[in-house]
Image (cartoon, rainbow, N blue to C red):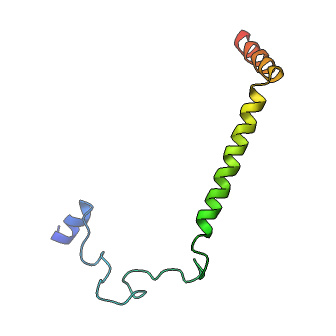
Amino acid sequence: MTRDSESIGRGEETEEDQPDRHQPAGQGGHQPRDEGACQPGDEGAMSAEYAVATVAAVAFAGLLIAVIRSPEIQEALLTIIRGALTV
């Protein structure tokens, strides 16, 4: 085995495996950023979308808590659990 094949066998990178750091972006070096990823003026759009999704999730959790605390739902859940445990 040569030194390169031994390095590869141990999972080490050789010089051929590494990108050429002296080439301009897009030519074997670092990949350029996606130009369409963020339009001017859209910098806060993702944060706003996360905020809306978080508020919606909290509202849904509050609704579920209100439903589960109702006596009718608690009784129905207990009936289902008791039925499952007696089988």
Q: Quadrant of residue 36?
A: bottom right
Q: Residue at x 46, y 83 (%)?
A: 32
Which residue is rendered at x = 48% and y = 80% of the image? 33
Total residue callouts: 0
With respect to residue 67, does 5 lie above or below?
A: below
Asked if 53 appears above or below 64 in the picture, the reply is: below
Q: Is residue 23 visible?
A: yes
Q: Is residue 44 above or below residue 61?
A: below
Q: Quadrant of the N terminus?
A: bottom left
Where residue 40 appears, x then y in whole percent?
59, 82
| Res 2 visible | no
- Left or right: 78 with respect to 5? right
| Location of residue 81 in the rendering, given as x and y in whole percent from the top left corner | 73, 17
Q: Residue at x 36, y 90 (%)?
A: 24
Tell which of 4 and 21 is nearer to you: 21
- Farthest residue, direction top: 86
Residue 31 lies left or right of residue 63; in this view the side is left
What is the residue that sits farthest to the right in this orientation? 72
User: Which quarter of the rendered picture does the C terminus lie within?
Assistant: top right
| Res 35 quadrant in image | bottom right
Which residue is drawn at the image coordinates 30% and 83% (left, top)?
A: 20
